[in-house]
Structure formats: C-alpha cells, structure tokens
Amino acid sequence: MGFILYLIIGGIIGWLAGLILGKDLPGGIIGNIIAGIIGAWIGGSLFGSFGPEVWGMSIIPAFIGAILLVLIVSLIMRALRK
C-alpha cells in the first residue's frame, strides 16, 4: 500500500510542478509520476529533508526538485524541436 501512495504523491507533485510552470511533460500521468519521484530525489539531494513528509517523501524539496526537472525537460524538448 505504501508504494501505491508513493506513486500517487509523486504524480501529484509532478502534476503541480507542470501546472505551476505551464509546461506539459511527455507521457501524461506516467510522466508526472516519474517527474515527482525523480524530483523528490533531486530535491532531497540538493536541499535535504525539511517540511512535511509523506511516506518518506519530503514534500517541499520534492516539489522544488520536480519544478527544476520539469524546467530542464522542457528546455531539452524545446532544443530538440529546433
């Protein structure tokens, strides 16, 4: 049950990061989940763990990391389209 909740939290964080930046990730729901989970790893590595924590995922660093990831992916996708 914990793994499913981890995926749901990752999806919500990835979706919110895309929503804040106004960028769509490729892959839809799966892309949002991946962005949220990788964003949690990036945010945890850069900022440590602070703020509220749900199922081992610190929400604030995960959200910041997901925003960074969505920004990087959108820049790469734009460069590949040119």
Image: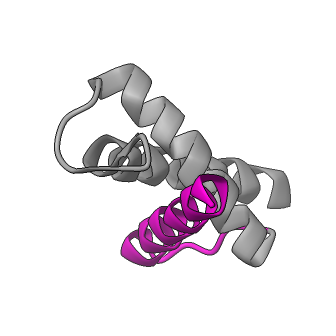
> Vertical placement of 23 versus 40: above or below?
below
Q: Residue at x 68, y 54 (%)?
A: 34
Q: Main secondary structure of the magenta part?
A: helix
Picture quarter with the N terminus? bottom right
Residue 73 seen: yes
4 lies left or right of 62: right
Residue 27 placement: quadrant: bottom right
Q: Is residue 82 visible?
A: no
> 49 above or below 72?
above
Residue at the image point whose x is 37% and y is 73% from the top: 20
Residue 79: image location, x then y, percent:
73, 50
**Where residue 61 sits in the image (x, y, percent)?**
31, 41
List the single residue furthest toward the left.
51
- Residue closer to the observer: 69 or 15: 15
Which residues fall within the magenta stretch? 1-26
Is 18 magenta? The answer is yes
Residue found 45% across the figure and 63% down from its top: 13
Q: Is residue 81 left or right of residue 2?
A: right
